[in-house]
Structures are given as C-alpha cells and as structure tokens.
Amino acid sequence: MSMIRPRVDKLLDHVDSHYGAVVVAAKRARQINAYYHSLSEGAYGEYTPPMVETGTGNYLTIALEETAQGKLKYEYKSSSTTS
C-alpha cells in the first residue's frame, strides 16, 4: 500500500479546504505540463518551471509538493451579483 505524499495535513496548512487543495494542485499541474511541453517546442520563459526538487516526474505530485511547501498563492474569484 502506498502513502499519499505529501501528507494531507501539510496541504491543509496552506489551503483552506480539501477542495482548495484539489483546485490549486490541478491548475498548477496543468501549468507544469505546459512548461515541459513548451520546452520540447523550443519556447522558453512563457511558463513557470517547477519550484521544488522532487524525485518524480508526475506533474500532480510536483504541484502537491509545491502546495505543501507554501510555494503557491491563490485566491478565489468572487462571483458577486448586484441587483
């Protein structure tokens, strides 16, 4: 049985909920994927590279590690409507 890395309690130190952790990590994993894809096409500087050293090539794991180490800042967009 494999353990989830990083631990959920470490993630929740930097996000307000499990939902927040999922949303932030998923968006960041897509950005990391775009970064590596752009490197293969010869484009540099358009996307932010991974901000942590890990032994994995899994983009979601990298994003979760970044979240657990407090490297990512986020805020929710408010969808306020006025009548």
Image: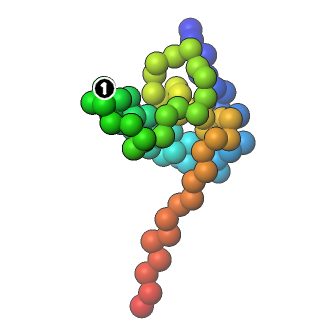
Whether residue 78 is situated above or below residue 13 in the rendered picture: below
Q: Quadrant of the N terminus?
A: top right
* Position of residue 43 measured from the top left corner of the image (x, y, whole percent): 33, 36
Q: Secondary structure at mark 1?
A: helix
The residue furthest left is: 41
Q: Residue at x 49, y 65 (%)?
A: 77
Q: How is the image coloured?
A: rainbow
The amino acid type, in three-letter code, at marker 1 is: Ser
Whether residue 76 is situated above or below residue 27 in the rendered picture: below
Q: Quadrant of the C terminus?
A: bottom left
* Position of residue 82 measured from the top left corner of the image (x, y, whole percent): 44, 87
Q: Residue at x 45, y 22 (%)?
A: 58
Out of 50 and 3, give the one closest to the viewer: 50
Whether residue 32 is situated above or below residue 5 in the rendered picture: below
The residue furthest top is: 1
Q: Residue at x 61, y 29 (%)?
A: 52
* Position of residue 48 measured from the top left corner of the image (x, y, whole percent): 48, 40
* Position of residue 63 measured from the top left corner of the image (x, y, whole percent): 53, 33
Query: Is 42 situated left or right of 72 in this image?
Result: left
Total numbered labels: 1
Q: Which residue is mark 1?
A: 40
* Residue 18 can be seen in this image: no
Q: In the figure, residue 34 lies in which quadrant? A: top left
Within 10 Å of the Cα at label 1, are there few (<14), some (14-19), or many (20+) other Cα atoms?
Answer: few
* Residue 10 can be seen in this image: yes
Q: In the figure, residue 3 lies in which quadrant? A: top right
